[in-house]
Amino acid sequence: MKFLFFTLLYQPLYNFLIFLIWLTPGHSIAVSIVILTVVVRLILLPTSLKAARLQIRTMELQPKINKIRSEIKDQKEQSQALMNLYKEEGLSPFGSCLPLLIQLPLLIVLYQVFRNGLTAVNPAELYSFIPHTVTINNLMFGLDLAKADPWVLPILAGLSQLVLSLMMMPPKPKTTAGQADPMAMMSRQMIFLLPIMTVFIGRSMPAALIIYWIVTTVFSIGQQWYVNKEIRNTGTRDERRETENITINKPNSLASPQPKKQDMLMKMMNKRLDKQERKSGVNVTVRSKKK
């Protein structure tokens, strides 16, 4: 297994990183890490988008899931009810986790690649056709990326993680009494825990890895913005269709006065005809008497 990870994942990514370091002006590892991270995220974009969509749909189902868990106490019946709910919605309870599990080994390998490529090039791990430089520029704005940065980069990583967490936050669900759901409130409080942990963990890691973390999070922010916009547009189209269906099925209020007008006209015409008939009848009767 270790050989497969090295041959299929680690070695190609490591060679690509060393090639980018050789290619970039000044042999900057910061620019190389940014390019490599963007390339990898673009390759993983289809699975990432799928995971983001499924995660949002799962969050939208959370009120129904909480209702099932509160009303059904038997574990077997509860599990069956949850499976029926997922089946009705066309979702899988593990659908949003599988794409992330696929990405996890690659992210671990990237961590190893960036850590091992910070100081020197290891010719034993390079392909024979990969050009490489002897020296690697670890400096970025005077900051040594091979060492830990205690404040600037970790704080930027934490702020970007906070923005991503807020974008992934579902709407506030309400209970029947109009009060906020306690479970939802707890989940929202936990959202702020990850950015804080990011800052503290980032202070002990090489700054180059924090650059990778920031670029990945910024890419995820753009991806989440796209998914949120897509879902909003889909919801708007569905609401518009429902409104159109209601309008079509609802009796036309503008057309309703027309039958009333027609009835009134018919009544007026009937009255006039009745009067004419009565007049004609009187005349006939008078004439008959004169005869």
Image: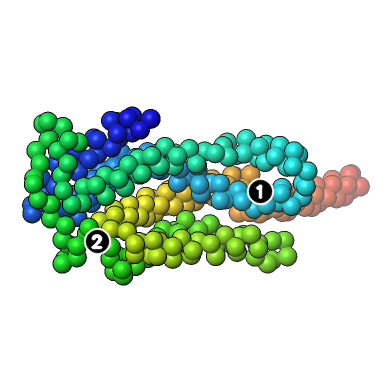
Which of the marked residues, 2 or 1, is nearer the chain's N terminus? 1
Q: Residue at x 12, y 35 (%)?
A: 130
Q: Quadrant of the C terminus?
A: top right
Q: Residue at x 71, y 47 (%)?
A: 68
Residue 83, which numbered label?
A: none
Q: Find the residue positioned furthest to the right.
A: 289
Q: Quadrant of the N terminus?
A: top left
The quadrant in which residue 92 appears is: top right
Q: Residue at x 41, y 58 (%)?
A: 164
Q: Is residue 24 left or right of residue 154?
A: left
User: In the rendering, at what x and y percent does residue 20 appear?
Assistant: 15, 44
Q: Is residue 195 left or right of residue 118?
A: right
Residue of label 1: 65
User: In the rendering, at what x and y percent does residue 237 appear?
Assistant: 49, 47
Give the colouring mode of the picture. Answer: rainbow
The quadrant in which residue 211 appears is: bottom left
Residue of label 2: 147
Q: Examine the rendering and report whether any part of residue 255 can be seen.
A: no
Q: Residues within 10 Å of mark 1 (few under 14, many from 20)?
A: some
**Amino acid found under the numbered disc labelled 1:** Ile
Q: Residues within 10 Å of mark 2 (few under 14, many from 20)?
A: some
- Give SS at disc 1: helix
User: In the rendering, at what x and y percent does residue 210 appear?
Assistant: 30, 58
> Residues under labels 2 and 1: Cα distance?
46 Å
Q: Examine the rendering and report whether any part of residue 43 can be seen.
A: yes
**Amino acid found under the numbered disc labelled 2:** Lys
